[in-house]
Image (cartoon, helix red, strand yellow):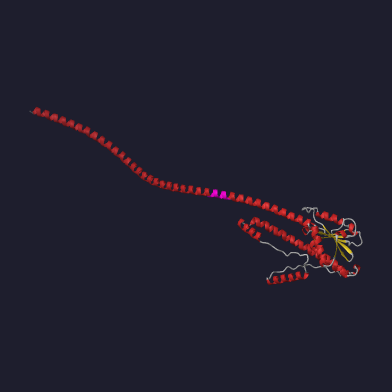
Amino acid sequence: MKLKNKGLTDLWHERMAQKDKDLGSLEMAMNKEIDHYRSEIKVLQTKLTDFDALKNEKSKLEVELKNTEKEKNALKDENTSLKKDEQNRIRDHQKAIEATITLQSSLEKEKERLNDERVQQEKERLEALRETWANHEKDVENHIRLICKNNVITYIEQNDFPYAGRKPDNTIEILDQLIIFDAKSPANDDLKNFPKYIKSQTENLKKYTKHENVKNDIFLVIPSNTLQVIKDVIYNIGDYNVYIISKDALEPIILSLKKIEDYEFADKLSPEDRDNICRIIGKFAHTTKRKIQIEQFFASEFLDILQKSKTLLPTEILKSVIEFENAEKLNPPMEKRKKPILTKDLIDQTNQLKKEIELRNIPQIEAKITFKEDN
């Protein structure tokens, strides 16, 4: 019984030792497993920390993504708006180009029209000049005839000129003296050679002055619009003098010459009377040339203004100006053969103008022209 119990005890101890050994092994295994789990926990804790960081990073990225989406949408809207604006700009630009092309075409047509108009105006001007010069000889003749008729002066018909050879255009007789007025005009619209032509004509007049009763003062009457190219208006050709005058100077010169009839003989004129006659003729000649010079100056200025108005005025205004211009008409007084132009009427009209100038407070221009008195 004791052996049996001892055996059981030994067996129990053996089993207990085995259990202890197994428990030790199990404990060691459990410790290793615990250590392993602790390591896993540490790894998991590290991963959890990393996960939190990733989560935070994800949150940030989500916020940035939303902002990026918003920015993208804003840029998309802006791009759409810019595209629309660009299309509008391209359309407006195209319209502007088309308008410019239309305007350029219109300007080219207007330029061609103006050029054609200028060419036509120049052509009409030249034709008017040619017509004026072509009619100059007859116009001068009619004017001299009218002066002679109004002032009882003898006009010698061309066929009645008493000497053989070429007859002068116009001859008047004052105190048994024949005074010659020859009309001269340019052959064409080129006035460069006109002064040479006039000079050559002055040298061909000796055929008239060789006769006793032909006055040695001969007058060449030229168109007023050619005076600007004539530098010398008096030619002293030895035995006779030639005066270059315009049609406007005919009446004062002829009336001054007629004054000689107030004396029985020309050689009885006193030096003072001779000087007075010369002074009057000189003053008429100077005044006539000065008047023509001023008119030419203003004609040039008016032409310049007309040219500038065509280029500087807006097209619509220019069209209205042309319409008003075409509607206007000037009717200057007509010259009638049987109606003399009385000096008294001209003086009365001048005085009336002076009164109107005074009433309107328009400053007058004083002509400070004086003539030297001979001692």
Q: Which residue is at 69% across, 57% downward?
A: 304
Left or right: 207, with 286 as reference point: right
Q: Is residue 281 visible?
A: no
Left or right: 295, with 173 as reference point: left
Left or right: 34, with 338 as reference point: left
Residue 359 position, x and y percent, is: 68, 72
Quadrant of the rendered image containing residue 278: bottom right
Q: Which residue is at 55% across, 49% downward?
A: 95
Quadrant of the rendered image containing residue 139: bottom right
Residue 148 position, x and y percent, is: 83, 65
- Look at the picture and state if 207 lies above or below 154: above
Residue 272 position, x and y percent, is: 87, 70
Taking the magenta stretch, the answer to whether it contains residue 257 is no
First to last magenta residue range: 92-99
Q: Which residue is at 59% across, 50% downward?
A: 102
Overall secondary structure of the magenta stretch? helix
The residue nearer to you, when weighing 372 against 103, is 103
Q: Is residue 29 visible?
A: yes
Residue 77 position, x and y percent, is: 44, 48
Quarter of the picture containing the C terminus is bottom right
Quadrant of the rendered image containing residue 255: bottom right
- Look at the picture and state if 358 lies above or below 126: below
Please, which residue is most extreme toward the left here?
1
The residue nearer to you, when weighing 323 against 285, is 323
The total of numbered circles placed on residues is 0
Q: Which residue is at 39% across, 45% downward?
A: 65
Quarter of the picture containing the N terminus is top left
- Look at the picture and state if 1 lies above or below 213: above
The residue nearer to you, when weighing 265 against 292, is 265
